[in-house]
Amino acid sequence: MFVTFEGIDRSGKTSQAKLLAEALGEDALLVREPGGTPAAERIRGLVKDADVALSPVAEMLLFCAARAALVDDAIRPALAAGKVVVSDRYADSTVAYQGGARGLGIDRVEQLNDWVTGGLWPDVTFLLEIEPAAAAGRRSDHEDRFEREGEELQRAVAAAYEELADRHPDRYVRIAAGLPMEEVHEQVLAELRARRPEAVR
Ligand code: TYD
């Protein structure tokens, strides 16, 4: 089973992905995007660096390159070994940030990612929804390229995610992420149990 977490910056995805992977124990592989392989981690450094100028297309292709490496080297082998793969962001992030917020086109970027991933889409995607203003309050000291652009970008990303959730109602589970972390985690577990009782003990 392939599970992803999506949402705007500081929606709490990283914590939830970790909590889920811990709850699943050895049956799970936790990965994050961009990253997860030596090549993809180097691309991560480049795309997050707010001091490196990148055009929207260049930025999108770098995320896709990192993803292609991660799918081949980590995600597909783990799925083939019967693991539950939990990913902190995946192709929908590129569709929402570059396709939606950067204006490259949701359809086009989704189609490209279908090719980039060899048609591998998650079984379940948890969309952690939080007001951009509330997420901005969770500010960290070091801001990356996307955080530095502020709330307007985050609003455009949130709108793109809403569209994706409407497009893929069977795969998407929307969760109010303003709740305490433990409560969000319980909702995630309950949803997975309902879908795949054998995967969540
Ligand atoms: P990250 O530290 O993972 O942020 P977060 O904890 O909010 O997920 O940084 C990834 C940043 O890159 C984040 O701002 C979202 C952005 N991003 C894209 O724009 N496109 C993508 O395809 C991915 C995977 C991330």
Image (cartoon, grey):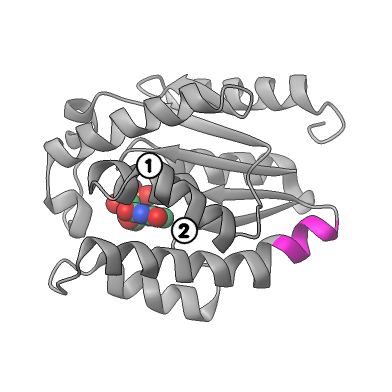
Magenta stretch encompasses residue 199:
no
Give the position of the N terminus as an image quadrant: top right
Q: Find the distance from the CA under tag 2 to the CA under tag 1.
A: 19 Å
Magenta stretch encompasses residue 80:
yes
In this image, 70 relative to 50: left or right? right
The response on whether ligand 1 sits within 8 Å of label 2 is: yes
Q: In the image, is residue 101 above or below residue 196?
A: below
Magenta range is: 76-81
Residue 39: % across, % down: 49, 80
Give the position of the C terminus as an image quadrant: top right
Q: Dot 2: what SS? A: loop
Task: Find disc 1 in the rendering and name its residue.
Answer: 106
- Judging depth in this view, the residue of 134 and 34 nearest the camera is 34
Mark 2 closeness class: few <14, some 14–19, many ≥20 residues within 10 Å:
some
Q: In the image, is residue 201 above or below residue 169?
A: below
Task: Find disc 2 in the rendering and name its residue.
Answer: 33
Which amino acid does the dot numbered 2 rest on?
Glu
Which amino acid does the dot numbered 1 rest on?
Ile
Say which residue appears at 47% left-offset and 58% top-offset: 33
Residue 148: % across, % down: 13, 52
Say which residue appears at 66% left-offset and 73% top-offset: 73
